[in-house]
Amino acid sequence: MVDLSEPIEFAGITVKNRFVMAPMVRNLATEEGVVTDAVVQHYEECSKGQVGLIIVEAAAINWEQRIMSKNIGIHDDKLIPGLRKLADGINAHGAKSFIQINHSGLKGHGKTRYLGPSNIPVLKNTNPESITVDEIEDVKQWFVDATRRAKEAGFDGVELHGAHYYLLSAFLSSYTNRRDDDYGGSTENKAKFSVDIIKMIREEIGDYPLIFRMNGFENVTDGVTMEEGIEIAKLVEQAGIDSVHVSCVVDATFNPGLPPYFDKDSQPDFLKEYPYDSCIPIAQQIKPHVKVPVIGVGEVRDEKLVKKFSEDNICDLLALGRSLLADPYFVQKILEGRGDEIIPWKE
Ligand SMILES: Cc1cc2nc3c(=O)[nH]c(=O)nc-3n(C[C@H](O)[C@H](O)[C@H](O)COP(=O)(O)O)c2cc1C
């Protein structure tokens, strides 16, 4: 059993309990990516609600390559003062503050260039360019620079966004990665982009807490298989990551551009114990293969499922997304045995 009220230590930090706020873009920054009071209040509220570790939404490492028009930016030193307010606000109420950093690649808002490993779109009406090796080198440095800014702003750590078919994720998946250079082909080659970034961060920034978010499994023809998900987790661990956050692509309705190979009725048995589209059973498969803490996520909406996660002894930390949007005090209510007072998320 995992006692979710217990602290956990990793990468030199102590998180006061096992509850994580999953990153969720909110479109609450300015059109220039500056953190606003609304952004700070949103995250402060969840810190007050006793979440142990907050992962701030995907911040753009390059402004053209953001997800939403009012994305948080981390692409310029000018943004550090706003980011500092955000980190301070989170830390003031006891949560550890992480920020996810991202290049939106094949997806994103009103971009002039959609970029991917190959010319394979995941969004309708886009015709992505295959990113060149020189451009890959630039992106690696943007990830390193963004990590430095997060550290200077006072965040306790960074999460690299390697999930959901954004740029790093698109390299990890054979559906989108058809390259025949050093970045395509074997799982090791497909992971090279992410692995190189992790190593560069270690060389240039040193021992700074780093989480890697990845699709552990993709219900997409030629997508990441369970075996590959395990392999990717091992590769990023070897490269120096401090924790793996296992997301996934199961429900095809969230990804209309991708070809799924099963639906709810024909899903593999190993997914069936949790609600459809939960990535927790996938994290469960990865957990025995790595030593770093594993974060599970997906579809946890009430006390009953929190209890099941704890009793199934699945992984080290539990991330909550939409449940915290519905009720920032979800965790506090669980910890105080007031689960019946939780305001539920409604689809
Ligand atoms: C509004 C919204 C925004 C999201 N933004 C991000 C994001 O910025 N980065 C990311 O990795 N996942 C993002 N996600 C996915 C969540 O982190 C999480 O994995 C997903 O919602 C499943 O967890 P849940 O069922 O507890 O909500 C987002 C989800 C939602 C609902």
Image (spheres, grey):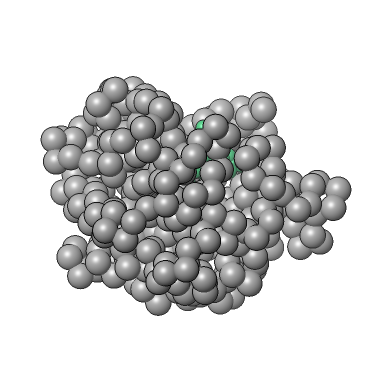
Residue 15's x, y, as percent? 38, 56
Q: Residue at x 36, y 32 (%)?
A: 112
Q: Residue at x 53, y 61 (%)?
A: 178
Q: Say which of 261 and 183 sits in front.
A: 183
179 lies above or below 249: below
165 lies above or below 289: above
Q: Say which of 25 and 136 sits in front.
A: 136
Residue 14's x, y, as percent? 35, 60
Q: Say which of 291 and 27 sits in front.
A: 27
Q: Quadrant of the C terminus?
A: top right
Residue 228 in view (yes/no): yes
Residue 234's x, y, as percent? 49, 74
Quarter occupied by residue 57: top left
Give the tally of numbered discs.
0
51 lies above or below 285: above
Residue 34's x, y, as percent? 24, 28
Quarter occupied by residue 122: top right
User: Seen in the image, is 291 located left or right of residue 159?
Assistant: right
Q: Residue furthest right?
A: 265
Residue 236 in view (yes/no): no
Q: Quadrant of the N terminus?
A: bottom right
Q: Say which of 233 and 333 sits in front.
A: 233
176 lies above or below 77: below
Q: Residue at x 47, y 59 (%)?
A: 171
Q: Residue at x 25, y 63 (%)?
A: 201
